[in-house]
């Protein structure tokens, strides 16, 4: 039952992540950097603070009493993850939801799922949740098989994207994704995928904070919420600086008070998008509390995002006009990712 609830929480988090960009589509007369940072203030500052306040007793005391070296690395990993999140937003601009998330999360899945257990093997005295322990147990081997199947599914999704690139005219490609640019998108997606995995490393680095939350009486479901506060400060730093620089370069500071724009609607939809984004990690923390912060939790989270984002991509007709073989390829990729979720779930149950 614990595994089942873990999968459900990860799916809810994946649904939030795979859906958060939709409200941004309702923003009018604002540049990308303007709505991205408004949403980001909710994502990386307000929502994490409120979640920790409501779920972790004396969370600020925990942060203040945490070793400065730990806080430093949690923050720095947040900064690196912030670069991944920043380029993630650019990926959505250039590739769309379905293809963009498939490529980004392919790299993110591999790095985020496998490096923490390898780290525990090489640099800690832990015997649980290490890569070597996964290799030696049946459940761990099944989880690693699920990781491999997920990467295969992501490869298939990426292949579908290349097929789409080769088949459609520039006008057709930009009908659903206005700034579609496959090769520019591929570069930023690669950067985003690798650095986005730093979020999982940040959770690992801040484990003493979640332990302290438990000692303070926090529900285990919400123990990671205290880590999210300094971790997302790092993400906010990166994104805020870059968006302000873009505001200055593009002379878009006027967006925030532009009388020609539907300001109230823009702020509301940006806030909804940002809050929805944070919910992915709120529920990730709940799922992780059931399954552990290993390859299984991370790959389940990534896989659920890919499933949801690809379904939205099909709904918004990002694959309109492609040939039947290309459409079948993207469906096969989604189905393969779904299979990987099932395999990872079996591996956890076996453990």
Image (cartoon, grey):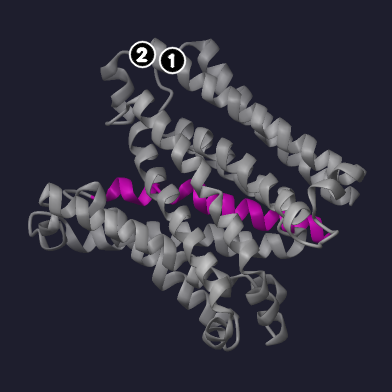
Circle number at residue 322: 1
Q: Earlier in the sequence, mark 1 or mark 2?
A: 2
For residue 67, which quarter of the picture? bottom right
- Residue located beneath label 2 in the image: 168
Q: Badges 1 and 2: C-beta atoms under 8 Å apart?
A: yes
Residue 97 seen by the camera: no
Q: In this rendering, is residue 206 above or below 214?
A: above
Q: Count the numbered circles shown.
A: 2
Q: Quote the CA–CA distance across marks 1 and 2.
A: 7 Å
Local SS, label 1? loop
Residue at image point 81% right, 62% down: 125
Residue 230: percent from left, percent from top: 49, 71
Whether 140 is among the magenta residues is no
Magenta range:
1-27
Quarter of the N terminus within the rendering: bottom right
For residue 139, which quarter of the picture? top right
Residue 43: percent from left, percent from top: 41, 63
Residue at image point 23% right, 55% down: 34
* Camera-side mark, 1 or 2: 2
């Amino acid at each position: 039952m614990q595994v089942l609830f873990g999968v459900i929480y990860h799916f809810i988090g994946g649904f939030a992540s795979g859906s958060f960009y939709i409200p941004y589509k309702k923003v009018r007369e604002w540049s990308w950097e303007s709505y991205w940072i408004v949403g980001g203030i909710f994502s990386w500052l307000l929502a994490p603070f409120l979640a920790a306040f409501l779920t972790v007793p004396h969370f600020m005391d925990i942060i203040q009493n945490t070793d400065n070296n730990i806080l430093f690395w949690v923050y720095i990993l947040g900064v690196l993850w912030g670069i991944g999140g920043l380029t993630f937003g650019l990926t959505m601009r250039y590739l769309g939801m379905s293809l963009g998330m498939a490529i980004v999360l392919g790299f993110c899945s591999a790095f985020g799922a496998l490096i923490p257990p390898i780290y525990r093997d090489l640099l800690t005295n832990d015997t649980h949740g290490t890569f070597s322990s996964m290799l030696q147990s049946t459940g761990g081997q099944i989880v690693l098989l699920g990781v491999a199947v997920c990467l295969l599914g992501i490869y298939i999704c990426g292949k579908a994207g290349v097929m789409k690139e080769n088949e459609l005219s520039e006008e057709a490609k930009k009908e659903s994704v206005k700034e579609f640019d496959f090769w520019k998108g591929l570069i930023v997606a690669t950067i985003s995928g690798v650095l986005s995995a730093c979020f999982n490393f940040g959770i690992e680095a801040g484990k003493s904070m979640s332990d302290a939350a438990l000692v303070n009486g926090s529900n285990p479901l919400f123990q990671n919420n205290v880590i999210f506060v300094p971790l997302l400060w790092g993400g906010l730093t990166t994104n805020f600086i870059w968006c302000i620089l873009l505001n200055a370069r593009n002379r878009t500071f006027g967006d925030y008070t532009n009388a020609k724009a539907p300001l109230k609607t823009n702020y509301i939809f940006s806030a909804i998008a940002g809050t929805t984004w944070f919910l992915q990690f709120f529920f990730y923390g709940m799922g992780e509390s059931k399954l552990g912060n290993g390859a299984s939790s991370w790959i389940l989270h990534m896989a659920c995002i890919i499933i949801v984002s690809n379904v939205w991509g099909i709904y918004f007709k990002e694959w309109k006009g492609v040939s039947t073989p290309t459409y079948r390829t993207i469906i096969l990729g989604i189905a393969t990712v779904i299979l990987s979720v099932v395999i990872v779930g079996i591996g956890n149950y076996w453990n």
